[in-house]
Amino acid sequence: MTANETRPIDGATVDGPACGCGPLTPEQIRVMRDHGTERPGSSPLNHEKRAGLYRCAACGTPLFRSETKYDSGSGWPSYYDVLPGAVESHTDASYGMVRTEVHCASCKGHLGHVFPDGPRPTGLRYCINGLALDFVPDTP
């Protein structure tokens, strides 16, 4: 496939003209379609402090608000809450461990994992690949 072709994830378009965010890079495809993980500390979003919205890089669905972002020390952008109905989850037993994988509810693109060791008020840590996100600041 070329970079301009669409790649379906469970019947939804994840890049190309029908996508809300434009074509995905090969590394984004590896993360979002093949359930890969970016290197810890590699995402510029780790240091993003502006107010805004984090959307799915594949389809543009709003996922997280900046108010729920925090520095978990994990090396990946982390959030303690998600926008209602934005993600779905399932058990991931790969690599000899059991985790809860989260994916975009709209296009099913792999985002990362959620863990029960986050801050209040939810106690959750959504540990998300920065490559799976598109940040839109509230004020440009």
Image: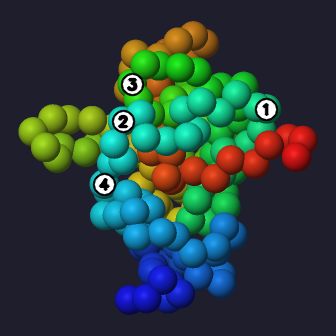
Cα distance in 3D space between marks 3 and 1: 21 Å
Residue at 70 percent of width and 28 percent of height = 49
Amino acid type, callout 4:
Gly
Lateral position of residue 30 relative to residue 79, left or right = left
Neighbours of disc 3 within 10 Å: few (<14), some (14-19), many (20+): few
Give the x, y percent position of residue 126: 48, 32
Residue at 48 percent of width and 69 percent of height = 25
Amino acid type, callout 3:
Ser
Residue at 65 percent of width and 81 percent of height = 18
Foreground pick, 44 / 66: 44
Of callouts 1 and 4, which one flags the residue occurring earlier in the amino acid sequence?
4
Of callouts 3 and 1, which one flags the residue occurring earlier in the amino acid sequence?
1
Disc 2, disc 4: CB below 8 Å? no
Q: Which residue is mark 2?
A: 40
Q: Which residue is mark 4?
A: 36
Judged from the image, the secondary structure of the residue bearing numbered disc 4 is loop
Judged from the image, the secondary structure of the residue bearing numbered disc 2 is loop
Of callouts 2 and 3, which one flags the residue occurring earlier in the amino acid sequence?
2
Cα distance in 3D space between marks 3 and 4: 16 Å
Q: Which residue is mark 1?
A: 51
Of callouts 3 and 4, which one flags the residue occurring earlier in the amino acid sequence?
4
Of callouts 2 and 1, which one flags the residue occurring earlier in the amino acid sequence?
2
Residue at 45 percent of width and 79 percent of height = 8
Discs 2/1, front: 2
Q: Quadrant of the rendered structure where residue 36 is?
A: bottom left
Amino acid type, callout 2:
Pro
Disc 2, disc 3: CB below 8 Å? yes
Q: Which mark is residue 74?
A: 3
Whether residue 138 can be seen here: yes
Judged from the image, the secondary structure of the residue bearing numbered disc 3 is loop
